[in-house]
Image: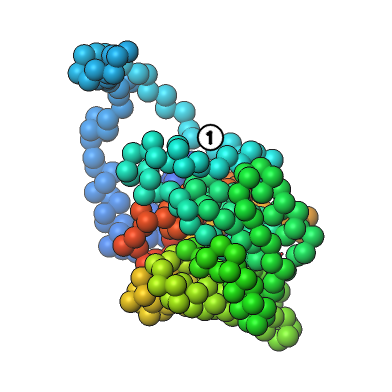
Amino acid sequence: MSGRTALRVTRAAAPLLSRSTRTSAAPISRALPAANRTFTKSAIRCNKNDVVHETEVPVSVYSADSNGAAGSTSDHFSIPVNRQDAKPQPFSTPEDADVIPLTKSVHRSMPPMMQKMSIMDKVVVITGGARGLGNHMARACAEAGAKALVIFDVNQELGDESAAELHQKTGLPVSFFKVDVRDGDAINAAVDACVETYGAPDVLINSAGIADSNIKAESYDPAMFRRLVDINLTGSFLMSQAVGRAMMKAGKPGSIVLVASMSGSIVNYPQEQSCYNASKAGVIQFGKSLAAEWAKYNIRVNCISPGYMDTALNRVPALDAQKKIWRSLTPQNRLGSVDDLNGLCVFLASDASGFMTGANVAIDGGYTLY
Ligand SMILES: NC(=O)c1ccc[n+]([C@@H]2O[C@H](COP(=O)([O-])OP(=O)(O)OC[C@H]3O[C@@H](n4cnc5c(N)ncnc54)[C@H](O)[C@@H]3O)[C@@H](O)[C@H]2O)c1
């Protein structure tokens, strides 16, 4: 058993020690090797009076006056220090929120840095865009200036519905292709049609994926194993290949964002899900390899690795008990919201991340810190 696994078992066996109990010195020093125990003893000798506990923070604010003239107004005051323990973060599911597209005139009025952070006039293909994280990243792309959105998803009804909704809310051209990401020929036909309608894509966001969990490796059906790897990993390859070829043919720079998972880098606890974890590790390594290969074509490839997110994938009653454990192992003490990937997704799609390729960025509320 690895050190990391041992740590997780301990935590789960005592769920649920409060945070203050977890950081108390006694149980930790018992587990420490001799060298570290010495360090702990010397730390105890510190003078308690060295600890800084201010009751207020002095502040100086320099601001422009009502006419916008700089340097004319200054204010000096203090704010009280509130020493209460951090409370769990509020949690929201912005399913029904409006989608407000970035217009050309607003874009023109933005400072250069914010313009670079936008994806003005880019054509964006999003797989798994019918619902969940993919759907919310599609909305974010509309708000960040996309010229057209192209959703690839295997779910005909949901895909159609979300494309219609996105178009209605934004006025942007939105197409839906009912495509299974395992089907290379269907993908190629759909990408060709997309190129004909909107021009070559500038951005691919590959969010289509499935999860199997709580299945022991010794009884995992090999056919299910192959199916999951086919969707999560081969699907990432087939989509990247088709969209990458279209970018190369058009001589366009491009950005490919692969939605992997923290499960590609760590082993989840307590559920057993070796196949999913392996598939996402494959996506991360595939993304890195592709980034190196395609840098010469000016095509960047990066991965987002989400932690536990509150999407339909996890809204299953059978997972309720496990979700408590997941939360307790997440420093932010919550599951991610469906729109928590949006900011990074837009950044990776935008020119602001122009020197970033082959990265794998976790968005996990701190889960992988432990
Ligand atoms: N929800 C989480 O906690 C979590 C955590 C880490 C990573 N992820 C990853 O994020 C991605 C999106 O997850 P989600 O929570 O939004 O899931 P979701 O089930 O809500 O959405 C996935 C979408 O992918 C589509 N899809 C599934 N199989 C497909 C196929 N063969 N071809 C085309 N489309 C297909 C589905 O129809 C659906 O619209 C997945 O790759 C998932 O592995 C999710």
Which of these two is toward me, 108 or 101? 108
Which of these two is toward me, 169 or 303? 169
Q: Residue at point 46% right, 42% down? A: 104
Which of these two is toward me, 89 or 119? 119
For residue 3, above or below residue 234: above
* Displayed quadrant of residue 359: bottom left
Q: Amino acid at mark 1?
A: Lys
For residue 31, above or below residue 96: below
Question: Residue 127, how many percent across, how many down?
Answer: 62, 65
The residue under label 1 is 87
Question: Residue 129, how many percent across, how many down?
Answer: 64, 59
Decide if residue 267 is in sight here.
Answer: no
- Mark 1: secondary structure: loop
Coloured how? rainbow
Point out the residue furthest to the left here: 71
Would you say 213 lies left or right of 143 here? right
Which of these two is toward me, 157 or 89? 157
Count of numbered circles in the view: 1
Q: Residue at point 50% right, 74% down? A: 246
Point out the residue furthest to the bottom here: 222
Would you say 334 lies left or right of 111 here? right
Q: Residue at point 24% right, 17% down? A: 69
CB at disc 1 and ligand 1 closer than 8 Å: no
Question: Residue 313, how many percent across, how many down?
Answer: 69, 60
Would you say 198 lies left or right of 228 here? left
Packing grade of label 1 (10 A; few <14, some 14-19, many >=20) is: few
Q: Residue at point 43% right, 58% down? A: 348
Decide if residue 284 is in sight here.
Answer: yes
Question: Residue 27, how many percent across, how many down?
Answer: 45, 52
